[in-house]
Amino acid sequence: MKDLFKKIKEGLLGPDGTGGGSGQQGVITAQELVDQAFEHFKMRLQDSSTDMSLLFPTSMIIYLNPEDYNARKQEFPARANDIKKKCMKEVRSQISGNSEWQDYIPHSKYWKIQFVEFKPECVINSDGDAHFSVEKGHVMIVSDLYANDLGESIGDSASSGGRIVTTVHNIKGTTSLQNLAINPDAFKDVTIVGQNCFRIEFLRADIYDTANNKHSAPVHSSTPPASKTSAETVVNRSTPSKQSNTPQKHVTAELQVWDSYFLVNGQKTDKYVITSERLQITGPSATTSTDGAELLKIDNDSIMNPHLNIRYDAPNKRFLISAVGDTKLNQKILERNPDNWSEMPNNSTILLNGDIQLNFILKNV
């Protein structure tokens, strides 16, 4: 056990065992905080990845000295977002340099980053207690590959599969960020889920920037580059004329669902190939589509009947989407209007009710 916590303290902080801090007597700067978390991330990425697969931590508990914590606490939403952005920049760089990683799909549903004040009386425990201190100007980090593993906040003590779960005792709450006049538009992708604990969606679009066509993964050998048209481009506001639902040979795309299943002919599946020109996505109780389109059910009662529509615009060789229920396309909120159609580029990410993620991949055009 002593060796275990030595590893936590020395192995997880950074290559030099201190987290890469400047060693200055003053409190940690915003940049130092982000840089130390990033160095930890790079070390874990190198340790967890192979030449065939890419893995890295998406959950971090960052322990700070009380002086550092109090100096930086109002910045925590921005720092969490900064850490996520810097880590994702590294992921994109790694993917571009390794052909075996080109088809990487996010292995975790979201990022979770929590900042904890580590007071002198705090104890980290698992099967036994271990006493540490965090020096001013430095951080101590415990991370996991999957955001769910560390629970919603410090204090979870459940353990599974022999994995060490740390808890911290005697940590008292500080001023809640919800009491501050924060502009939600500034941190629209950051959700506060606990005491200075932040959750940020981890979407395929974070890696493959379909909206700006900066990076497109070769999902299929014949897959074309992503469209340069913004995902929020309004195509028209009138209901499209009824088209033939007969599939055309070149019109195929695939939907992949996370955190749920598609229901197809009474069977559960996480992938569905679109072969028709009109598709309506619904909850499990739907019996027929509203306009004769092909019906695709999701095994989740929160999904509306219908929730969204997808159609193929044959003359322009593009797929369009309109929303009835709560829907995001590539992190952009879609207007809940079935007559408001937006273009859906290749490798798009669709988020339903902020919870169920669909990936849209062109297979043959």
Image (cartoon, rainbow, N blue to C red):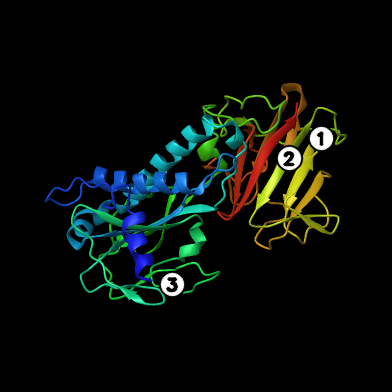
Q: Quadrant of residue 245?
A: top right
Mark closest to the chain's N terminus, 2 or 1: 1
- Residue beneath disc 2: 254
Assess disc 1: are there few (<14), some (14-19) or many (≥20) residues with their C-alpha within 10 Å of its C-alpha: few
Q: Nearer the viewer, residue 264 or 134?
A: 134
Q: CA distance from mark 2 to mark 1?
A: 23 Å
Mark closest to the chain's N terminus, 2 or 3: 3
Is 63 placed left or right of 262 in the picture? left
Assess disc 3: are there few (<14), some (14-19) or many (≥20) residues with their C-alpha within 10 Å of its C-alpha: some
Q: Quadrant of residue 309?
A: top right
Q: Is residue 165 above or below residue 256?
A: below
**Mark 1 or 3, which is nearer the eye?**
3
Residue 235 shows in this picture: yes
**Mark 2 or 3, which is nearer the eye?**
3
Element marked by disc 2:
strand
Amino acid type shown at disc 2? Glu
Mark closest to the chain's N terminus, 1 or 3: 3
Seen at 52% across and 47% down, the residue is 55
Q: CA distance from mark 2 to mark 3?
A: 38 Å
Element marked by disc 3:
loop
- Residue beneath disc 3: 156
Residue 196 shows in this picture: no
Q: Is residue 324 above or below residue 149?
A: above
**Mark 2 or 1, which is nearer the eye?**
2
- Residue beneath disc 1: 242
Q: CA distance from mark 1 to mark 3?
A: 54 Å
Q: How many marks?
A: 3
Amino acid type shown at disc 3? Asp
Seen at 58% across and 26% down, the residue is 229
Residue 79 drawn at (x, y percent): 32, 48
Badges 2 and 1: C-beta atoms under 8 Å apart?
Answer: no
